[in-house]
């Protein structure tokens, strides 16, 4: 439990030291699942929020396999091919891919008419590491875009005499074979993601600086940080602005992959004009080491404002070619494009080969919240470890810090596969009260604002809770925040034993180290109200010390 929270591994993409790379591979091997199993409960069509793309299915479906593997007969790419940037133009897929043959990485070109069978260019490699000192250690992970007949590629150059060693380099072409000499545009950082439409065309966005092309870049490394850059011409990038990802601390390491706007997720559904960002890393790893892919939504009118994040992976390592390779248990993507009424995600597998996963538009939007046991296909949380500071009676936090010893930065509320009432997964909560007059923490769990469930006089809330080890762990209850600013905990609802459904009123009424069933007729006090979100609250006036436990099998019935 929490075994790997203090261990930060980096993948071959990040060029780890040999000792760290070996340690990560050993950890990956230690916690590897059988090739037929997945590391996380990837999303299904029934539980994705409306703004997210997916679910993804590996292609070709009859026999999942990489679409491109190393060519042992070509010395420059005889060992690994990975992390491609792909566009669809002139009735063909054009792919720039990273490769190596034991020497510094370079970039090759391959084309396909069906998106599955690719033919390499006779001119490979088409982008070499020829700009010293920035590219002396190789060039990696090409992002590829096309605008008005010009192709733009953003690559990571490595200079091992510098720390951090990465530089974002940019080069252009009109034929994908002959590229201009790359120029450095962002020093000591990498993972650039220009905001595009679903056709890999950069989009002008109205910003505080006027209409600009926008690029997000960076990763979880505090030495590099995360930023937004702006451009009028796709060549000169200015007004570098930091932003916060709001990820739990145990998600690190993670990296920005790509960003897209003006996109659809549901057939005949609305176009989302916000910005969807794909990220990759140890996100939602449930205390096992892997590199998976997930999604985050940002506002298009306030580019630093995060609107939502998935709390499970969109794609996590599952197939043999993802579980085994240079960097075990790894998937990483550089491109997303919409073609033939479905999304194409080309990705690097185990830092060794290239795979394809596709996602058609979903047949319908997400349904209103009714129940979940946090199992595959069921509703997953919309936040992880995020305090509710939304105003009104949303709760907030006072005199509560992180559960010690695991590198957390605040109270925890996220899924874990270690103790469940049913199935394999439950919602874990934890924190540490510091002994103030008021000790409480309310964290957001489910966003119900897009499709609020109906609440009438007979609506009942029920859930199972497992308070662990200390009496403080019983001072916990689910809470609800309504559109009128009120909260369930203050409306006088009582559970089946007559105790108020308020975290402080649950103190001492739950049995430690076993599952307790809590049920309450919330319709008696909340009928007709519009539910905005479901929170989990800890509240213990004068509390002092740690608390932790699990919640499972939540149900809202009328």
Image: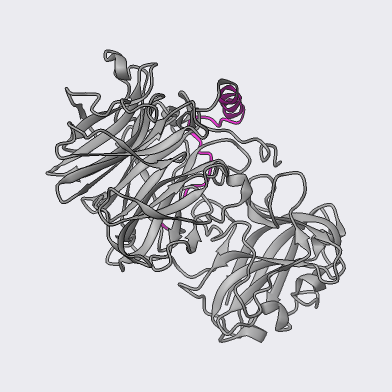
Image side of residue 468 versus residue 125, left or right: right
Residue at point 44%, 61% (across, down)? 298
Residue 414 drawn at (x, y percent): 63, 54
Asked whether 526 or 400 is in front, the reply is 400
Give residue 252's quadrant in the image: top right
Q: Is residue 413 left or right of residue 290?
A: right
Q: Is residue 335 magenta?
A: no
Determine the residue positioned at 69% across, 49% down.
408
Q: Quadrant of the C terminus?
A: bottom right
The image shows residue 332 at horizontal and vertical percentages of 42, 38
Viewport quadrant of the N terminus: top right
* Count of marks, rendered view: 0
Residue 404 shows in this picture: yes
Stretch in magenta: 20-45
Give me the residue at 49% from left, 54% from top: 377
What x and y, as percent, mark residue 405? 76, 44
Between residue 329 and residue 253, name the one nearer to us: 253
Residue most toward the left? 90
Compared to residue 264, the image places residue 556 above or below, namely below
Where on the picture, by quarter, is residue 443? bottom right
Asked whether residue 61 appears in the rendered view, the answer is no
In the figure, 270 relative to 152: above or below?
below
Query: Image height check: is 173 above or below 554?
Result: above
Indicate whether 375 appears above or below 493.
Answer: above
Percent across and percent down for residue 179 are 21, 34
Task: Judge left or right: residue 161 versus residue 91.
Answer: right
């Amino acid at each position: 439990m929490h075994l790997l929270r203090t261990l930060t591994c980096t993948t071959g993409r990040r060029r780890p030291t040999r000792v760290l790379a070996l340690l990560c591979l050993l950890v990956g091997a230690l916690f590897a699942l059988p090739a037929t199993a997945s590391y996380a409960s990837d999303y299904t069509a029934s539980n994705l929020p409306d703004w997210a793309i997916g679910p993804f299915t590996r292609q070709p479906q009859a026999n999942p396999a990489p679409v491109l593997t190393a060519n042992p007969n070509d010395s420059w790419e005889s060992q690994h091919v990975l992390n491609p940037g792909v566009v669809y133009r002139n009735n063909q897929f054009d792919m720039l891919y990273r490769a190596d043959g034991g020497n510094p990485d370079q970039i090759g070109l391959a084309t396909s008419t069906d998106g599955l069978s690719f033919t390499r260019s006779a001119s490979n490699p088409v982008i070499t590491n020829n700009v010293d000192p920035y590219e002396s250690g190789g060039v990696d992970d090409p992002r590829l875009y096309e605008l008005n007949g010009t192709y733009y590629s953003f690559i990571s150059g490595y200079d091992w005499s510098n720390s951090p060693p990465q530089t974002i380099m940019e080069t252009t072409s009109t034929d994908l074979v002959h590229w201009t000499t790359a120029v450095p545009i962002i020093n000591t950082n990498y993972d650039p993601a220009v905001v595009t439409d679903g056709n890999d065309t950069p989009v002008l966005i109205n910003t505080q600086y006027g209409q600009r092309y926008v690029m997000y870049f960076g990763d979880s490394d505090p030495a590099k940080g995360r930023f937004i850059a702006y451009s009028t011409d796709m060549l000169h990038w200015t007004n570098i602005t930091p932003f916060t990802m709001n990820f739990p601390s145990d998600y690190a390491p993670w990296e920005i992959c790509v960003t897209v706007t003006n996109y659809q997720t549901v057939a005949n559904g609305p176009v989302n004009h916000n910005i969807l960002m794909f990220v990759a890393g140890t996100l939602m790893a449930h205390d096992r080491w892997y590199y998976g892919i997930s999604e985050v939504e940002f506002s298009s009118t306030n580019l630093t404002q995060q609107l939502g994040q998935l709390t499970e992976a969109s794609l996590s390592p599952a197939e043999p070619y993802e579980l085994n390779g240079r960097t075990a248990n790894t998937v990483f993507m550089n491109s997303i494009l919409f073609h033939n009424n479905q999304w194409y995600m080309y990705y690097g597998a185990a830092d060794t080969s290239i795979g394809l996963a596709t996602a058609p538009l979903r047949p319908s939007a997400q349904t209103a919240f009714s129940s979940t046991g946090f199992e595959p296909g069921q509703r997953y949380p919309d936040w992880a470890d995020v305090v509710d500071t939304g105003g009104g009676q949303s709760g907030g936090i006072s005199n509560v810090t992180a559960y010690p010893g695991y590198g957390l930065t605040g109270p925890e509320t996220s899924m874990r596969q270690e103790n469940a009432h049913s199935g394999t997964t439950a919602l874990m909560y934890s924190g540490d009260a510091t002994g103030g007059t008021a000790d409480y923490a309310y964290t957001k769990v489910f966003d119900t604002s897009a499709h609020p469930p109906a609440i009438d006089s007979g609506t009942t809330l029920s859930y199972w809770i497992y308070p662990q080890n200390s009496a403080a762990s019983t001072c916990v209850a689910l809470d609800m925040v309504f559109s009128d600013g009120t909260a369930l905990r203050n409306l006088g609802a009582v559970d089946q034993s007559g105790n108020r459904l308020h975290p402080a009123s649950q103190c001492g009424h739950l049995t430690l180290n076993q599952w307790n069933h809590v049920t309450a007729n919330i319709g008696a006090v909340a009928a007709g109200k519009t539910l905005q979100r479901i929170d989990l609250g800890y509240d213990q006036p004068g509390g002092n010390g740690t608390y932790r436990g699990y919640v499972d099998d939540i149900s809202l019935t009328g």
